[in-house]
Amino acid sequence: MSHVSATEPRCTSKSGIIALTIEARVRDLDGSPVRRVLPSASRRMVGPFIFFDHFGPTIYAPGTGLAVRPHPHIGLATVSYLFEGEIMHRDSLGIVQPIRPGAVNLMTAGRGIVHSERTATDLDGPLRLHGLQLWLALPDEQESCSPAFEHIDASRLPVFKRDGVSGKLIIGEAYQMRSPVEVFSKTLFMECAMANGSQLTLPDDCAELAIYVVDGELRIADEIIGGGTMAVACPDHPITVEANKHSRIAIVGGDPVGKRHIWWNFVATTKERIEKAKTDWQQQRFEKVPGDNEFTPLPER
């Protein structure tokens, strides 16, 4: 079981701007490769973000696709965001919701929820899938809240354009804009496309902030940040990023929520909560996903 401390390493870089960089590690998710950024050995959380996966771009042949079987969560909220493709979300609340590019799905697990994520296998041609899967650790007082689900269409999310940068505010507040997505603690999640040579000064009101390069290349102070890399910012210092080529970036941050334990799909303030969730799942006490009855066993470790 992994323990996530509330106290992360402080800034030690010479520039005083970037505390550290994290290279994504390739993992397998039901046969599909993903790049996992958080948690890492060097940095466990950024604000409330305790998990950061970048999947794709992957091309699935007709008749194949993503097939993540029903699995449980506690103590967190999942954020699903696509650049390309489509995923069908089903959960134990009875929600059936396609996830499409530019929209956002926020699933609050609280005391417990089960969901599956699959792509259609009856498409006429190949499917290209590309996106992010993030987890937010819930504050202590919301850790065992009732499970919930929120879907926000792309058209409802604030967008901005300035000097070669096109941005979308997915969660939080920035640049005099506010996202309609409701979260339990101060959180920031943005996506930006940057033209070659463009610059962007990032919001400076987050206690913790990080920039992930989905594709392309950034210059931050004297450091070059390539695709598949996250740069964690030093606190209390304005940051301007510059695109060395056309780039897509994700910006995440917010206020820390405190120490957490994480094991498989479970996040909790105590080991006891996780042990109970493991037993409940083994004994199939969680609610079922209507129409999707496959079972995912607990991992061996």
Image: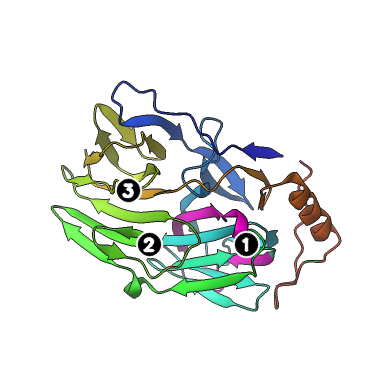
Place of residue 78 in the rendered image (x, y in percent of width and height, measured from the top left): 55, 59
Q: Which residue is mark 1?
A: 67
- Mark 3 is on which residue type? Asp
Q: Amino acid at mark 1?
A: Ala
In front of the other: 179 or 220: 179
Q: What's the distance in space between the residues labelled 2 and 3, CA to CA?
A: 16 Å
Query: Tag 1's secondary structure?
Result: strand
Residue 170 - label: 2
Q: Which one is in front in this view, the residue at disc 2 or the one at disc 1?
A: 2
| Helix, strand or loop status at disc 2 | strand
Give the SS element for disc 3: loop
Looking at the image, which residue is at 24% across and 26% down? 222
Amino acid beneath label 2 = Ile
**Residue 100, position as x, y percentages in the image:** 43, 69
Mark-to-mark CA distance, 1 and 3: 39 Å
Asked if residue 105 is positioned above or below residue 27 in the image, the reply reads below
Give the residue at mark 3.
205
In the rendered structure, which disc, 2 or 3, sits on the residue that comes first in sequence?
2
User: Horizontal placement of 83 versus 271: left or right?
Assistant: left
Can residue 120 be seen by looking at this rendering?
Answer: no
Q: Nearer the viewer, residue 174 or 83?
A: 174
Tell which residue pokes out farthest to the left in this image. Answer: 163
Between marks 1 and 3 in the image, the one whose residue lies nearer the viewer: 3
